[in-house]
Image: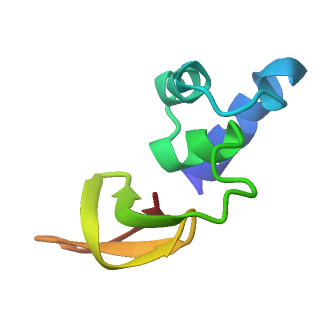
Amino acid sequence: MRRTILALLLLAAAPAAAQTTTCTPQCVQSYEQRGLPTWEARRVCGCTAGTGGTATTCVTAVGTCRMAAPAPAGSYCVCATPRGPVPGRAQ
């Protein structure tokens, strides 16, 4: 819930031009520096929109893990951790 509110605040504070840019490392880094996880920064920058690509890594708030099988980029995934499963996004 807090992450969703943070994302909405960041998007509201971002200039309109930044929301319409194409996927660049600078765009992703700028959102990561504001606190968004990598998968969300890539989504905001348009990195996964319309690519139709597949992903082999699951990115979570606590780290990454390799997935057992490729999945569509941006889809839901789960990493196993010593404290239990952690949800993430395929990247």
- State which quadrant residue 12 falls in: top right
- Give the answer, above or below, for where 33 lies relative to 82: above
- Give the answer, above or below, for where 2 lies relative to 35: below
* Direction from residue 23 to residue 60 in the image, left or right: left
* Direction from residue 71 to residue 8 in the image, left or right: right
- State which quadrant residue 73 falls in: bottom right
How is colour applied across the structure in the image?
rainbow
- Residue with the most extreme bottom position: 69
Q: Residue at x 62, y 24 (%)?
A: 27
Location of the N terminus by quadrant is bottom right
Q: Nearer the viewer, residue 87 or 50?
A: 50
* Direction from residue 30 to residue 62 in the image, left or right: left
Q: Nearer the viewer, residue 83 or 18?
A: 18
Q: Residue at x 64, y 44 (%)?
A: 47
- Residue with the most extreme left position: 82
- Give the answer, above or below, for where 56 lies relative to 32: below
